[in-house]
């Protein structure tokens, strides 16, 4: 998606060669006009798939997912991160290793909100090693729901998550795919 790539080039900041900071338009301050274009693109890609729920993970996926849910006219659920040891039976839970923070945490979704009859589109801001997306896929599977696919704003294609999850047969649509990032701040798209 050209507008997103141009914005990444203009305002994205490369940290340590592998982290892309997009705090000025996506992760902290949020450009809702851009989110609307992102949502339109996901509607074009997944609009015929009878999506009944948008699923994302807190916190940075929530903003985009809300605008996407508005387009699909369905609810959005965000998986909550928790450190609680004894998780009640009322939730689906799985473990995720955080790429940005390097720690392992549980993510949960209430069984009340994810049902076997749901057709789920997962939305997230980044795909890197694939841990967050794998965790969300596990929650969908645990609920017996149908996974329509995943819509990702920015995929760092030089990290293994996208390839690993596509090899499992998951439909992943990423709007900006980064081939490489340099220590000098340069960014190359696929
Ligand atoms: P993964 O689990 O695929 O390794 O990483 C996905 C999650 O880590 C995303 O939800 C995102 O919050 C965070 N993340 C991964 N890489 C980056 C990055 O380069 N920049 C930012 N801002 N977040 C990232």
Image: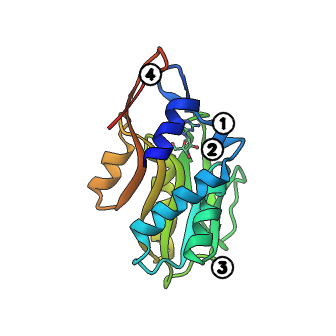
| Image location (x, y in percent) of residue 61 | 61, 53
Reading the image, the residue beneath label 3 is 112
The answer to which of marks 1 and 4 sits earlier in the sequence is 1
Residues at badges 1 and 4 in contact (C-beta under 8 Å)?
A: no
Residues at badges 1 and 2 in contact (C-beta under 8 Å)?
A: yes
The mark lying in front, picked from 1 and 3, is 1
Alpha-carbon span between mark 4 and mark 3: 45 Å
Which residue is drawn at the image coordinates 51% and 50% (left, top)? 132
The answer to which of marks 2 and 3 sits earlier in the sequence is 2
Alpha-carbon span between mark 2 and mark 4: 19 Å
The reply to whether the residue tagged 2 has its Cβ within 8 angstroms of ligand 1 is yes
- Is residue 79 placed above or below 99 in the rendered structure? below
Residue 26's label in the rendered image is 2
Q: Residue furthest top?
A: 184
Residues at badges 2 and 3 in contact (C-beta under 8 Å)?
A: no
Residue 189's label in the rendered image is none
The mark lying in front, picked from 2 and 3, is 2
The reply to whether the residue tagged 4 has its Cβ within 8 angstroms of ligand 1 is no
Which residue is drawn at the image coordinates 55% and 74% (left, top)? 72
The answer to which of marks 1 and 3 sits earlier in the sequence is 1
| Image location (x, y in percent) of residue 161 | 39, 44
Residue 23's label in the rendered image is 1
């Amino acid at each position: 998606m050209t507008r997103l790539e141009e914005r990444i080039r203009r305002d994205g900041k490369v940290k340590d060669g592998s982290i892309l900071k997009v705090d000025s338009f996506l992760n902290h301050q949020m450009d809702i006009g851009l989110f609307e274009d992102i949502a339109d693109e996901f509607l074009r890609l997944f609009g015929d798939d009878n999506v009944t729920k948008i699923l994302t993970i807190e916190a940075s996926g929530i903003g985009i997912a809300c605008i996407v849910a508005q387009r699909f006219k369905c609810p959005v659920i965000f998986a909550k991160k928790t450190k609680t040891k004894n998780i009640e039976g009322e939730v689906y839970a799985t473990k995720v290793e955080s790429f940005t923070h390097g720690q392992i945490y549980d993510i949960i979704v209430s069984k009340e909100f994810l049902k076997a009859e749901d057709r789920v589109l997962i939305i997230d801001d980044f795909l890197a090693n694939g841990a967050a997306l794998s965790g969300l896929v596990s929650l969908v599977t645990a609920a017996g729901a149908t996974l329509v696919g995943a819509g990702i704003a920015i995929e760092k294609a030089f990290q293994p998550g996208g390839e690993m999850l596509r090899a499992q047969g998951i439909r992943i649509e990423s709007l900006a795919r980064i081939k490489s990032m340099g220590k000098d701040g340069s960014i190359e798209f696929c």
